[in-house]
C-alpha cells in the first residue's frame, strides 16, 4: 500500500491504545496511514529506530521504558523535549536528521484545562512522583502560572533535583510524602507508578482544599487507587489519565501531519473500549 507508516515502540506494548487512537484521528482528518504497536527488545532500541526510518517509516511514538533513550538518539530536540530530556515523538526531516519532541506535558495540561475546565493558574499544586512523566509535565504546567508547586516522592532527592532544575520557571518545592501535613492544595496530580499495582502513597488526610481537583496519570476501566483516595477525601473533581493519553497522541499527530484532530469523540470511544474489555 501507499499508506504512510507509523508505529509506537515500547516494552511491554501489548496493551497500547495508540494504534486505535491514531487510526481514529486519521479517519477524521482523511489521512491514509497505518500505525502499529511494536515490542522492542531492551538492548535494541536505537537499531530498531534506524531500521524503521530507513525502511520508510514516517513517525514513531516511544513509550516505557525508551523515552530517555529516544531523547539521546535524536539529533535535534524541540526546546520542551530538551528540557524534559525525554522524547515520545520522533520523525526524520528531508535531510535525514532525526528529530524528537515530547507531547505528554501539553497533553496533560490540555486535558485538565481545555477538556475538564480545571484551573491551574494561581492554584497550589501538589505533584506525587518524580519520574519521567513529571519531567515532561513541569514546563507546560509552569506556563499556566500556578501559585506554587510542591513535588513529593519516595526518593526525596529525585523530587529535589526536579525542583532545582525547573524552579527557574517559578516556585517549586520538594520533599517526602510527610512534608505536606499542614498544607492544603487545590490541584493534586498523581504520577506515581505504584498505582499500576493498585497502591497509593501514604499521603496525610486533610491536604485537599475545598475545591480541590485530583488528576491521576493512570487510567483503566475501574477508578484507580488514587482516584478512590481522592473521593474518600472529598475531592471536588477527580479524573484519570485517559484524556491525557488521547491529547498527547493528538499533539503527536499534529507534529507529524499538521492537522489537529477532534479529541473528545476519541476519548469517548476509548472509554467504551476500556469498559467493554473490563
Ligand atoms: P517512572 O518509572 O519514571 O517514575 C515512577 C514514579 O513512581 C517515581 O516517582 C517512583 O518513585 C514512584 N514509585 C514507583 N513505585 C513506587 C512504590 N512502590 N512506592 C512509592 N513510589 C513508587 O514512571 P513515569 O514517570 O514514566 O510514569 C508514572 C506514571 O504515569 C505511570 O503509571 C505511567 O503509566 C503514567 N503515565 C501516563 C501517561 C498518560 O498519557 N496518561 C503518560 C505518561 C505516564 P521513586 O523515584 O522513589 O522510585
Image (cartoon, rainbow, N blue to C red):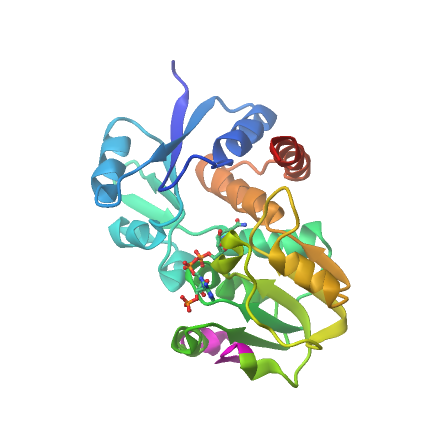
Of 157 and 262, nearer the camera is 157
Q: Is residue 111 left or right of residue 234?
A: left
In the rendered image, is residue 203 in sight? yes
Residue 272, compared with residue 188, is above or below; it is: above
Q: Is residue 150 left or right of residue 99?
A: right
Quadrant housing the N terminus? top left
Residue 268, x across and y down, in percent:
68, 36
Q: Residue at x 38, y 41 (%)?
A: 12
Total labels drawn: 0
- Magenta span of residues: 165-177
Tell me, yes or no, whether the highlighted magenta stretch contains residue 221: no
Quadrant housing the C terminus? top right
Q: Residue at x 62, y 72 (%)?
A: 125
Of 36 and 11, nearer the camera is 11
Residue 252, x across and y down, in percent:
48, 42
Q: Residue at x 61, y 27 (%)?
A: 28
Residue 78, x across and y down, in percent:
39, 54
Residue 261, compared with residue 5, is above or below; it is: below
In the rendered image, is residue 122 in sight? no
Q: Residue at x 55, y 45 (%)?
A: 245
Residue 141, x across and y down, in percent:
56, 65
Question: Which image quarter: residue 54?
Answer: top left
Residue 126, compared with residue 258, is above or below; it is: below
Residue 213, compared with residue 208, is above or below; it is: above
Question: Which image quarter: residue 113?
Answer: bottom right
Q: Is residue 277 left or right of residue 159?
A: right
Tell me, yes or no, whether the highlighted magenta stretch contains residue 175: yes
Residue ranking furthest to the bottom: 182
Amino acid at each position: 500500500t501507499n499508506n504512510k507508516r507509523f508505529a509506537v515502540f515500547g516494552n511491554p506494548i501489548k496493551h497500547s491504545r495508540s494504534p486505535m487512537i491514531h487510526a481514529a484521528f486519521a479517519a477524521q482528518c482523511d489521512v491514509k496511514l497505518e500505525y502499529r504497536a511494536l515490542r522492542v527488545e531492551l538492548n535494541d532500541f536505537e537499531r530498531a529506530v534506524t531500521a524503521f526510518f530507513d525502511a520508510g517509516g514516517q513517525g514513531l511514538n516511544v513509550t516505557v521504558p525508551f523515552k530517555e533513550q529516544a531523547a539521546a538518539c535524536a539529533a535535534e530536540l524541540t526546546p520542551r523535549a530538551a528540557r524534559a530530556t525525554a522524547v515520545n515523538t520522533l520523525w526524520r526531516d528531508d535531510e535525514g536528521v532525526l528529530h524528537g519532541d515530547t507531547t505528554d506535558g501539553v497533553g496533560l495540561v490540555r486535558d485538565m484545562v481545555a477538556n475538564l475546565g480545571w484551573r491551574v493558574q494561581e492554584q497550589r499544586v501538589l505533584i506525587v512522583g518524580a519520574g519521567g512523566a513529571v519531567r515532561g509535565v513541569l514546563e507546560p504546567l509552569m506556563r499556566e502560572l500556578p501559585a506554587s508547586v510542591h513535588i513529593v516522592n519516595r526518593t526525596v532527592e529525585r523530587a529535589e533535583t526536579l525542583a532545582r532544575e525547573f524552579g527557574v520557571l517559578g516556585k517549586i518545592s520538594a520533599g517526602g510524602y510527610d512534608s505536606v501535613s499542614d498544607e492544603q492544595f487545590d490541584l493534586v496530580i498523581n504520577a506515581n507508578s505504584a498505582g499500576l499495582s493498585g497502591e497509593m502513597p501514604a499521603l496525610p488526610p486533610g491536604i485537599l482544599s475545598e475545591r480541590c481537583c485530583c488528576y491521576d496519570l493512570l487510567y483503566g476501566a475501574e477508578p484507580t487507587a488514587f482516584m478512590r483516595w481522592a473521593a474518600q477525601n472529598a475531592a471536588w473533581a477527580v479524573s484519570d489519565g485517559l484524556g491525557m493519553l488521547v491529547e498527547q497522541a493528538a499533539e503527536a499527530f499534529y507534529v507529524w501531519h499538521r492537522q489537529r484532530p477532534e479529541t473528545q469523540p476519541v476519548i469517548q470511544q476509548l472509554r467504551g473500549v476500556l469498559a467493554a474489555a473490563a
